[in-house]
Every structure is written in structure tokens, then in C-alpha cells.
Image (tube, rainbow, N blue to C red):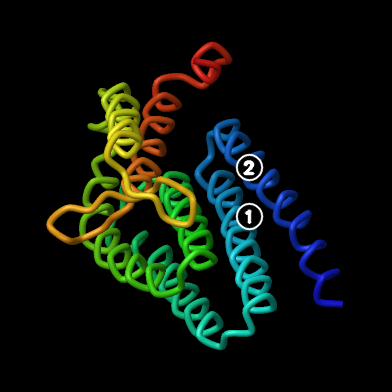
Amino acid sequence: MVNVIIEVSKYLLIILMALYTYWNFRYFRYQEVWQQNRVCAKQNAVMFLMHLLAYAVLYLKSEDERVVLFYLAQMVFFAAYMGLSRYFYRNLSRILMNNMCILLMIGLMILTRLSFDKAVRQFLIVAALITWIIPFVMDRAWQLAEIPWVYGIGGLAVLALVWVVGNNSFGAQLSITVAGISFQPSEFVKITFVFFAAAMFYRSVDFRTVAA
């Protein structure tokens, strides 16, 4: 029965990701703020459902109660962050925040499957980082829209650095160690990718810009 639930969950996650992506593009078809907020609310529902399914699968496979507690801690944090940030940062782009949060969620899901302890450390870093630094930057996203290629080139440069000097972990080259501290540059690339996509969409949403 457990195997059936796990297999069904895989297909559900694919469907939910497709829905989230569809609403990402649907957002730009609307001009009214209330319509855009409605799309973002649908994305939020999909995000948390994906999060729940992923950690349910992880728990069924590991039967480790720490996974449940870790999931609850993440759920509370992301819900509080997305709810409160709109009050503290009035100019914050909600679609940009959604994309940042879902990429962080996916990163934590993957890392939890590989190493629970590393996932906890990563979560603590993420909690401190996005709470104090990222909202400050996102609140000024309109200024950052002038330099989209900086994000794209910067992300590719970081990935190239991992390819050259990265550490192998569980058969994958993901992290870099500096002064005895290991970190995953891919988390930085997730953020720069969101900035790059947002800056390009800010310029234009026609087919040529999207395809480029």
C-alpha cells in the first residue's frame, strides 16, 4: 500500500508543478491587482500541497519522525514569511516571492532526501537569509530590472565554479567548501534565476522575449 501511495504521489507532484507553471504565465495576462493576487493564492495552495506530498513520501520511506517535525517547521516558517512580508514590504512582487519560495522548498525537499542533518542546517541559513536580506532586495526589484543579464551570467559562472572545484556528495557535484564550511551555490543560482526571469518579463512578455 505504501508503494502505491508513493507512486501516485510522484504523478501528483508532476501535475501540481505543471499547474504552478501555468499560473506563473497566467499571472501576466491580468492587469488588475485583485486578479493577480487570485492567481498567486492558487500558486500558494499548490506550493503547500506539493510540500506536504513530498514530505509525506519522505516519511513513508524513512519512517523518521524528525521528518514530520522538520516539515511542520518549514510550513510554519514559509506561511508566516509569505503572510507577513506583504505588510512589511508594500512594494514586494508577490509572484516573485512565490517563485523564490517554491524553489527554496524544492531545494529543501531534495536535500532532506539526501541528508537530513544538512537539510536542517540549510533551512536555518535560508531562514536567516531570506528573512532579512532577500525581502530588502525584492522590495527594490524595479531597480534591478535594468540588469537581467548580470543575473544570468552570474548564475552560469557560479555553476561553472561548482563544476571545476565542487565536492562530490552522493554521486553528485553540488557543494563547495571554503574555510571548512560547505555550501551549495545552486541555492544562490535559484535566486538569480528568479531575478533574471522577473527582469525579462518586466521588460516584455511577448513571445520573442520569453523564448530568449
What residue is rendered at 46% in x and 48% in y? Answer: 172
Residue 206 on image: x %, y %:
55, 16
Q: Residues within 10 Å of mark 1 (few under 14, many from 20)?
A: few
Position of 47 relative to 53 (above/below): above
**Of residues 47 and 30, the one drawn nearer to the viewer in this rendering:** 47
Q: Badge 1 is on which residue?
A: 42
Position of 22 relative to 152 (above/below): below
The reply to whether dot 1 and dot 2 touch (C-beta < 8 Å) is: yes
- Find the distance from the CA under tag 1 to the CA under tag 2: 8 Å
**Of residues 110 and 188, the one drawn nearer to the viewer in this rendering:** 110
What residue is rendered at 36% in x and 44% in y? Answer: 191
Position of 205 relative to 98 (above/below): above
> Which quarter of the picture shows residue 162?
top left
Residue 3 on image: x %, y %:
82, 71
Q: Residue furthest top?
A: 208
What residue is rendered at 60% in x and 71% in y? Answer: 55
Left or right relative to 14: residue 190: left
Q: Badge 2 is on which residue?
A: 23
